[in-house]
Amino acid sequence: MISTDETACIYAALILQNDDIAITAEKISTILKAAGVNVEPYWPTLFTKALVDVNVKQMITNVGTGAGGAASASAGVTAAGGDASATAEESKEEKEESDAESDDDMGFGLFD
């Protein structure tokens, strides 16, 4: 479970990001002090180091988006000059065949 110290640092980092201010340990500590929240002294530094190369705004706006394995593979084929729709259809056919084979192996075939 997430601790109060972690939650406070997360909110402080989000406040800084929202105001387009660089996320530093000192600034996180300043916000926490102004809010009257006492955290262990290592938390602000830990969050600062964890967020060094992270675009927090982009991470938040892309929470619900994600590419599945098939979509990524198709994108890679397209980028390499292949036909993504043909690849997608082939992988769909292979999946259907493997599902049918697995049913037959267990004695649950359609025509048993």
Image: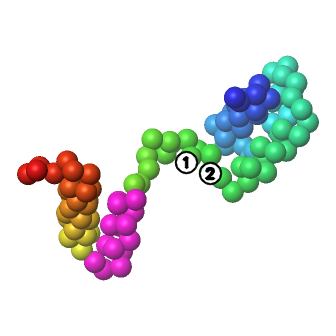
> Which residue shows up at 28% across the image and 78% down it?
82
Instruction: Kindly identify the residue that appears in the image at 84 percent across and 38 percent down.
Output: 43
Instruction: Indicate yes or no whether the magenta region holds residue 71.
Output: yes
Magenta residues, as a range?
69-82
Would residue 92 be seen by someone viewing this image from the given angle?
no
Q: Amino acid at mark 1?
A: Gln
Residue 2 in the image: state x and y as whole percent. Answer: 71, 30
Q: Residues within 10 Å of mark 2 (few under 14, many from 20)?
A: few
Residue holding disc 1: 58
Secondary element at tag 1: helix
Which residue of the protein is positioned furthest toward the bottom in this rendering? 81
Where residue 104 sits, quadrant-wise, is bottom left
Label 1, label 2: how many angstroms apart (C-alpha)? 5 Å
Task: Name the residue tied to disc 2.
Answer: 55
Q: On the rendered structure, is 112 left or right of 107? A: left
At 91% from the left edge and 36% from the top edge, which residue is drawn? 41
Q: Are marks 1 and 2 in contact (CB under 8 Å)?
A: yes
Q: At label 2, which amino acid type do we have? A: Asn
The residue at 25%/57% (across/down) is 105
Image quarter of residue 40? top right
* Structure colour scheme: rainbow
Which of these two is toward me, 83 or 12? Answer: 83
| In front of the other: 3 or 27 | 3
Residue 13 on image: x %, y %:
72, 37
Please, what secondary structure does the residue beneath circle 2 have? loop
Within 10 Å of disc 1 (Cα), the crowding (few <14, some 14-19, many 20+) is few
- Residue 55 seen in the current view: yes
| Residue toward you, 96 or 60 | 96
**Which residue ends up furthest to the left in the rendered image?**
111
Give percent across and percent down for residue 1.
Answer: 69, 29
10 with respect to 81 (left or right) = right
Is residue 12 found left or right of 67 in the rendered image?
A: right
